[in-house]
Image: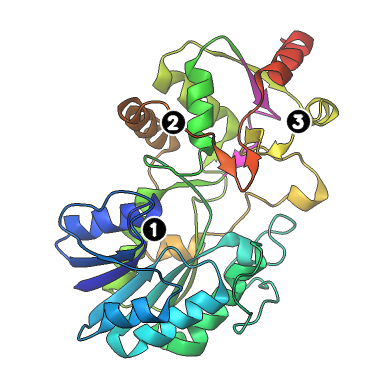
């Protein structure tokens, strides 16, 4: 197949391109060249997806069987790309987010859950927010229609080449050894999907020209927080000792959920269903997820090759990871 990737050099996009090349597809990537190196074997076209002129230059005299969009964030930009690409592409696959659902975290989700109220014609350059992915979905459907559109609502991605740094922070902290604050209860379920498994499933659907929506993450209770921490200890070989601290103590100490201790959210009403996304439709369609321990091991091996990051891990403007002084206070109280 001839496949166009909007993005294609960063984490999930890279995983898609790597898989497509491995399977012998002809790959074109379209990006600014600012987020990572191009993979050998792919045709790299430089341009900005928010520029009508750049998009017009991309499609001139060209046609692809499918486009995979891992970089769409704004409804206006998604609509622009879809409008320009429509005569040149047979099938459009968009990686949306589980955050596009209005009740994410509060109730279990499936493909029929209610989306945020964000219109397809939302003006450009909106402040980032979960609702925008829902607007992107509507913009795609307005241009390509339901029969040519594939929407994957992505859960939490982990694995080699991770760009955000949640799993990377855990590995690096546990790799230092000693006592480590572990959040909540070790038996609490989590849903983390390896980007390579997501890409393999997504590309398989593209090859079959599947349309519709799939909630795409690891199955419910496929792993626990304790298994994640234990996998990090084994992968790093550090002999680190987890010290489990319950939700109330963490909140009392001012620990910021999600960012200071990645993947942790206290059992409060708005968070009770964070890890309760129903993936049964995706599993029936062929989604297969490797054991989390394998992902952790491979990510640690990649980290060893990459070396220390020169930039802090951030979610938006918020630092990822528990400050050492805050961790020490907790360890003195609970260790």
Query: Measured along the vertical axis of the image, is residue 147 above or below residue 72?
Result: below
Residue in view at x 60 percent, y 70 percent: 125
Residue in view at x 31 percent, y 78 percent: 209
N-terminal label among 1 and 2: 1
Q: Which residue is at the front of the view, 172 or 181?
A: 172
Categorize mark 2 by other alpha carbons within 10 Å: few (<14), some (14-19), many (20+).
few
Which x, y percent locates residue 233?
48, 19
**Element at badge 3?**
loop
**Element at badge 2?**
loop
Report how far apart the C-alphas of labels 2 and 3 lie in the structure. Answer: 24 Å
The residue indicated by pointer 2 is 309
Q: Quadrant of residue 137?
A: bottom right
Q: Classify residue 97 as left or right of residue 26.
A: right
The span picked out in magenta is 180-190
Categorize mark 1 by other alpha carbons within 10 Å: few (<14), some (14-19), many (20+).
many
Mark sitting on residue 287: 1
**Element at badge 1?**
loop
Q: Which residue is at the front of the view, 305 or 287?
A: 305
Residue in view at x 48 percent, y 33 percent: 168
């Amino acid at each position: 197949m001839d496949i166009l990737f909007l993005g294609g050099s960063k984490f999930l996009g890279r995983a898609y391109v790597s898989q497509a090349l491995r399977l012998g597809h002809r790959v074109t990537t379209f990006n600014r060249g600012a987020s990572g190196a191009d993979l050998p074997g792919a045709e790299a076209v430089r341009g900005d997806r928010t520029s009508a002129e750049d998009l017009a230059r991309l499609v001139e005299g060209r046609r692809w069987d499918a486009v995979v969009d891992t970089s769409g964030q704004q409804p206006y930009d998604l609509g622009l790309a879809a409008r320009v690409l429509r005569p040149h592409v047979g099938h459009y696959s968009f990686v949306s987010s589980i955050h596009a659902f209005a009740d994410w975290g509060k109730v279990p989700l499936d493909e029929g859950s209610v989306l945020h109220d964000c219109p397809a014609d939302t003006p450009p350059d909106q402040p980032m927010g979960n609702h925008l992915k829902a607007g992107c979905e509507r913009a795609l459907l307005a241009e390509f229609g339901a029969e040519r559109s594939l929407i994957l609502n992505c859960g939490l991605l982990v694995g080699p080449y991770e760009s955000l740094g949640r799993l990377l922070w855990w590995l690096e902290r546990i790799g230092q050894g000693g006592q480590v604050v572990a959040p909540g209860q070790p038996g609490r379920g989590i849903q983390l999907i390896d980007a390579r498994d997501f890409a393999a499933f997504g590309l398989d659907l593209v090859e079959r020209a599947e349309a519709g929506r799939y909630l795409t993450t690891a199955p419910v209770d496929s792993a626990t927080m304790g298994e994640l921490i234990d996998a990090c200890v084994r992968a790093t070989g550090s002999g680190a000792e987890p010290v489990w601290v319950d939700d109330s103590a963490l909140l009392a100490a001012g620990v910021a959920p999600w960012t200071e201790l990645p993947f942790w959210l206290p059992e409060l009403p708005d968070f009770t269903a964070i890890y309760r996304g129903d993936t049964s439709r995706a599993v029936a369609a062929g989604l297969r997820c490797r054991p989390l321990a394998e992902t952790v091991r491979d990510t640690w091996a990649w980290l060893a090759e990459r070396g220390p990051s020169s930039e802090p891990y951030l979610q938006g403007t918020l630092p990822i990871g528990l400050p050492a002084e805050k961790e020490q206070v907790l360890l003195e109280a609970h260790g």
